[in-house]
Image (tube, rainbow, N blue to C red):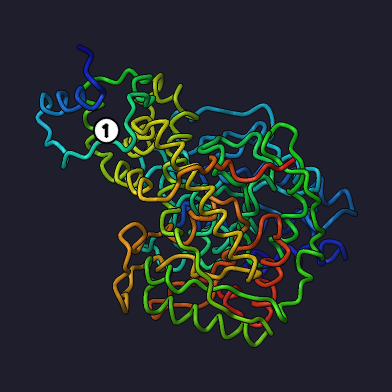
Amino acid sequence: MPITRRQATCLLLASAGLPLSSGAAPSGESGDAGITELRLPPEVLAQLEHSAQSVFEEARWLEELPLEGLTPGFVFIPH
Amino acid sequence: MAELCYLSIAEAAWLIQRGELSPVDLARAYLERIGRLEPTLHSYITVTPDVALEQAKEAAAKKQGGPLRGIPISYKDLIATAGIRTTAASRVYEHWIPEKDAFVVTRLRERGVVTLGKATLNEFAFSSGSEQEFITPARNPWNLQADTGLSSSGSAVAVAAGLATASIATDSGGSIRMPASYCGVTGLKPTYGRIGRSGVVPLSYSCDHVGVITRSAEDAAILLTALAGRDPSDAASSDVAVPSSVELLSRNPRGLRLGVCPSYMEAAGVETEVAAAFENALEVFRSLGAVVREVEIPHLSYAPAADFTILRIEGFNAHIRNLRDKREKFGPSAFREIAVGGLLSTTDYYRALQARTLIAGELRRAFETTDVLVTPTTPGTGIAGAYARPPRDPKVAKSDVAYLAPFNLTGSPAISIPCGFTKAGMPAGLQLVGRAFDETTIISMAHGYQQATDWHRRRPSL
């Protein structure tokens, strides 16, 4: 059974001896994040995710917004 | 000589056009001052004396030209300059010598501007600035221990210290306005798409803006007129008509409606001394005939999170090849800050773009009853001070970018101008935000304020 990126990261954190985060998962995790493109060594990936908690929290705040039915905004159409 | 280095663009242009000041003498005065002060201030990654003197001689030989002929400036070192090393403050680009000028450099070279060199930034305009490895961070000329603000620090320091008449910089989450505020100079981030970005090392496609750091709103108007207009190599570039510098300064503040947002200021907080300077500035605007009223933008406190979520994901994708192939060349902070965007998902991105729609709509509604939004540029100054009341909202409390990043998200034009000093001698900044493509109103308001006050004329002791 394939494991999710989050599960893999938890395993890596545990194996690297780093403290696990407060359990926060990246907001909207869908297994599609681009980090795998970097082919980072496990310990580097673990450190990166460990340092990313405030970034995940920031993204999670956006879940509180009333966004239902809104189109994505690419600022202005200049032409 | 120091007096020459504190001439505004308008003042220097007047003297050059009348034949009372040689562009060569002006360039030499700057190069002498750079040589003396750079070992302390580190506002340049690369100084280009030979290029500057050659271009100054060309400008002198032309005898006639516009207001930028012979004006010495710097470029943030992520703006490509043909034949001049462009590093983005990173070992990744340590040896890159572009073959072609960026759009903005071409525009200014055509007008006879003189290139003094490439201004210091933090790596790729997105490292924390605290783990610099490749370059020495710029120092704040008002207090060498004070924060300079990120990321266009060298640009703001050079303009404040008389080491450049102006500097061309970039702003994706506040990177022009914050250092302008911390260093006591004027910083303009025009509307998204107003100035072309081809040849600029990207961070975030939909949040990156090119703008200017100057000593006055008048100088910002002169540069904007020269820089704005369609860039065929930047798909986001606008062909909206560009006002002349005279038009940009022409709007009378009388009767204009200034919107303040007290609920947001309570959420983000403002240090006591900055709040006092801000209130005094509102009185100046009232004395100029403007009307100050309260406005509400209900979800503004989510804007920095939306801006930085977009910026991180776009930044990751802009740098993905170097992150993968040249990881060892990144400083640890830059790698962490940029690579972390790869941990966010397409759902995060889509949600942040929806948040942009929501907040931009709320801002548009606010602009139905107000002409300009006015805020402190930052909650504090380059030296941390005290808050009279604790900020209410953890999403933005005491955040350096609380008042800045929302307008990268919405693409709105915004200008920061000095509006006072703290007892510790640090400049405080005021921000004016306008409707899309209405730089005229905010620059005119800033110009009116600067004609009624002298904060922008104060100089650090060096």
Give me the residue at 56% from left, 81% from top: B282
Rendering coords of residue B325 (x, y %): 41, 19
Amino acid on which disc 1 is placed: Leu
Tell me where residue B200 sits by quadrant. Answer: top right
Q: Determine the chain carrying the residue at label 1.
A: A
- Considering only vertical position in the picture, is A6 above or below B287? above
Image coordinates for residue B250, horizontal then vertical, percent? 79, 70
Circle 1 crowding by C-alpha within 10 Å: few under 14, some 14–19, many from 20: many
- In screen coordinates, is B66 left or right of B183? right
Q: Is residue B219 above or below residue B208?
A: below
Q: Is residue B258 left or right of residue B238?
A: left
- Eyeballing the image, is A65 above or below B286? above
Residue B334 seen anywhere in this rendered image of the structure: yes
- Decide which of A47, A22 is in the foreground and name it: A22
At x 24%, y 22%, the residue is: A4
Q: Which residue sits furthest front?
A: A69
Where is residue B239? Give x, y as percent: 78, 44
- Residue B162 or B211: which is nearer the viewer? B211
The residue beneath circle 1 is: A48
Residue B367: quarter of image:
bottom right
